Amino acid sequence: MDGARPPMHAVPGPWQRGFLSWLAGWWHLLVFGSQMLVLALSPSSYRRSQRLVIYRELVAATAPQLPAFVVVAAVVSLVIIRIVVATAASYGLSRYALDVLVRTLVLELLPLMVALFVALRYTMPGAEVVAALRVQGRFKAMWQAGGDPARDELLPRVVAGVFSVALLAALGCLLALLLTYLTVYGFTTWGFDAYTRTVGQVFNPAATLIFAFKALFFSLTVAILPIAPDQLHRGDAARRRRDNIGLLGRVFALILLGEVISLVGNYY
């Protein structure tokens, strides 16, 4: 017989091609993230003209988000605090309410909320701008002019995203701790010693280290993933909407993975 067909196992099936494409996409993301980290740690990335761009991006990433975040964080914190305090009191477990609140609200829920808040309000809308610059050929023109798009255009957005998550996480945790004290003890100082002792017992060295690494992982995820090459929307409007949903799913999946790892580190 002429024209013998190759064996079936030599031709990748649809699921194999999809899996290889999935691996290639995450590999490109890892390479891009490593490039951003190297640029962020390089002193040459912070020359005077570049610092001005980074400062403007830091303000754009934090100032517009502060009012809305403070309101959302305060409302969510008050609701959760009230539920936990009332439930603990009804079961005669009021002495455990503070410990539960600090562990669930401050250590776990608020960092997760901050990461999603910054992703939806800053980094994902910024990905639209980066995608437009790529389509318009601005990055290619920068290369031809002797510039570096990764350093001059993308790095300020990554630094601003990381800074925004870190700042809002710190602000949200302090706000939650303050509201917890006021809800439990009121506007008095008699419970300050017991309260700080409970918070200190929760934030032991291991828990503090895990919290810091989790916040760093969340900030890098929401800052790098939306602007990574081949992870952006393209094509017609329907395709862009599907890519937006897929991008949000990838961001949420990585954040959830970091949260699961932190839970394992804290409680197992």
Image: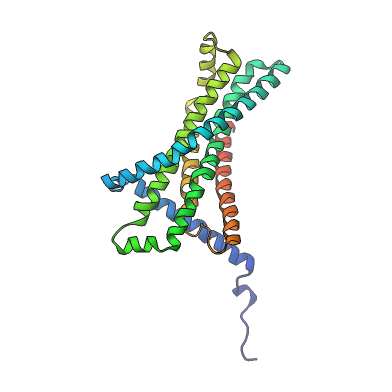
Q: How many marks?
A: 0
- Tell me, what colour scheme is on the image? rainbow
**Residue 266 vertical placement versus 200 (above, below):** below
- In front of the other: 242 or 109: 242
- Residue drawn at point x = 47 percent, y = 38 percent: 64
Q: Which one is in front, 218 or 129?
A: 129
Image coordinates for residue 55, horizontal then vertical, percent: 35, 41
Identity of the residue drawn at 53% across and 37% down: 114
- Percent from the top left, x then y, of residue 18? 60, 64
Question: Which residue of the protein is positioned furthest toward the right in this rendering?
Answer: 90
Which residue: 50% across, 49% down?
Answer: 125
Which residue is found at the position 42% from the left and 39% from the top?
163
Quarter that holds the C terminus = top right
Most distant residue in the left direction: 48
Which residue is farthest top? 190
Quarter of the image with the N terminus is: bottom right
Left or right: 111 as drawn, with respect to 33: right
Location of residue 124 with respect to 265 vertically, above or below = below
Q: Position of residue 105 (x, y in %)?
A: 58, 29
Q: Is residue 54 visible?
A: yes
Q: Position of residue 66 (x, y in %)?
A: 48, 34
Residue 91 in view here: no
Q: Quadrant of residue 102?
A: top right
Quarter location, residue 4: bottom right
